[in-house]
Every structure is written in structure tokens, then in C-alpha cells.
Amino acid sequence: MGVYRKSLDEPEATEEYDGDGTAEAVQIGDNVVWRSRLKPGWSWAKNAEPRMGMDYCPASHHEYVVQGSIVYRMKDGTSVTCREGDFVIIEPGHAGEVTGTKECILIDW
């Protein structure tokens, strides 16, 4: 067909973060696209580490920050704050934490 359409408003998978947010996914072609809606106070340490059993995320990400802000801290101690309108490539070995008072909305592929 040449054109494929999916909507994150009709997710094929959903993850809940203990009342601090959700992540919804669709698979389109060979790609999985996630939309995360993370409330102020969400953090890897609080909401993902207990479930994953790891201090840092083992995956790499390509993200676009739709709304809000999030800081990513790397294993080596460096950190970067990402805000609305930023595109980000994140290597494995990071932990995120939502900053500010707005919900952070991320598109991840």
C-alpha cells in the first residue's frame, strides 16, 4: 500500500506507572512508537527501577518532548534537561526524572 496509519489514541500496549503516568504504544511496520505521559514527580528510581530491577535504563531512545521537561542523568554523572520542542537521542545507562509542574509528554521511537 505504501502508507500505514496507527494512532496512539488506540494503543496496542499500555504501561502504568503507579499512578504517576502511562506509556502507550503502537507498532507500525518494523517500528514501535511510544507516547509517555509522566506526571510531575515521576522518576526512573521511583516508577521503573523497582519493576525493572536496574539502576539505569538499558535501552536507547529517540524522543521528542511534546510538553513539559525531563532531566536525564547518565551513569557517568552527566545530565541534560530536555524541554518542549527538543529532540533527544539517549544512550543506554540513563535514569530520567520529570522536572517542573507540567505533565511531561514524550514521543519515543
Image: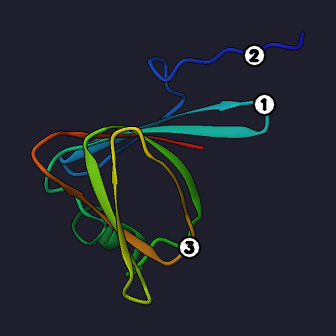
Q: Are marks 2 and 1 in contact (CB under 8 Å)?
A: yes
Colour mapping: rainbow
Q: 10 Å neighbourhood of mark 1: few (<14), some, or many (≥20)? A: few
Earlier in the chain: of badge 2 and badge 1, it is: 2
* Residue closest to the far top: 1
- 87 sits left or right of 41 in the view: right
Which numbered mark, 1 or 3, is in the foreground of this view?
A: 3
Q: 10 Å neighbourhood of mark 2: few (<14), some, or many (≥20)? A: few
Q: Which residue is label 3 attached to?
A: 92
Earlier in the chain: of badge 1 and badge 3, it is: 1
Mark number, residue 4: 2
Q: Quadrant of residue 43?
A: bottom left
Q: Quadrant of residue 24?
A: top left
Q: Position of residue 75 (x, y in %)?
A: 43, 86
Q: Which residue is label 1 attached to?
A: 29
Residue at 19% of width from left, 48% of height from top? Answer: 20
